[in-house]
Image: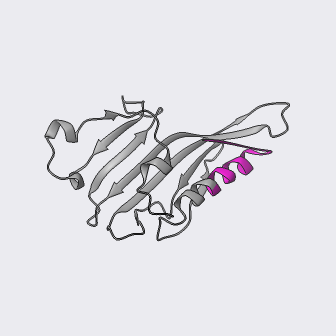
Amino acid sequence: MTLRGRTSDEAADGLRSTVQEIMGCLLHGPPARIRRRPNSDDYDLTVGNDVPYRLAGPVHVRLHVRLLLRGTHHHGERDPWDVHILAYQYTLLDADQHEILAFHLHPVGTSRVTTPHLHLGTGAGQLRADLAAAHVPTGPVTLASAVPTVCK
């Protein structure tokens, strides 16, 4: 997902608004928040206060969402800035806050796995030890496709 704007802050806020719309009917908690990293065109976007929040609906599932956005400037264009999702963590947790599953993309950092992948946690039930530690390849995952849909 990429959004354009006259400034990187405008484009980043547009992406924040889109995330808020996706999460609007799913989440019981504070809205999506964005923070620009110092001396950078990168932004941290979190849903709520960067803690897991209970999803609406009868099942007691919690969601934790964290995105890293990157701004890019294109000289000479009407809306010269675009902001896109560089990295994500979408984590579903059970009522006791045990990780059920987590979709990750972190192409920069210390992990040797830089492609989109899935983690299965103890909240998913009994797992083989090697599967619980695995990074299962997924391809890119959008926020809208990662969360259970209860909106009508």
User: Exactly how many numbered labels are in the figure?
Assistant: 0
One can see residue 30 in this view: yes
From the top left corner, tell me how far across and down residue 61 is, in percent.
Answer: 34, 63
Residue 6 part of the magenta-drawn span: yes
How far across and down, in percent of the image, does residue 16 sit? 62, 54
Direction from residue 70 to residue 89 in the image, left or right: left
Task: Please check the rendered image and state whether residue 111 is part of the magenta-colored stretch, yes or no.
Answer: no
At horizontal 43% and vertical 32% (from top left) the residue drawn is: 139
Q: How is the image coloured?
A: one colour
Q: Is residue 149 above or below residue 139?
A: below
Residue 18 position within the rendered picture, expressed as x and y whole percent measured from the top left: 62, 54
Which residue reaches farthest front? Answer: 152
Q: Residue 50 or 145: which is nearer the viewer?
A: 145
The region drawn magenta spans 1-17
Q: Is residue 16 left or right of residue 118?
A: right
Q: Nearer the viewer, residue 146 or 90?
A: 146
Res 40 seen here: no
Q: Quadrant of residue 80?
A: top right
Residue at the image point whose x is 72% and y is 45% from the top: 8
Please tell me which residue is depicted at 53% across the width and 69% down the height of the picture: 30
Residue beneath the point at 32% across and 58% down = 93
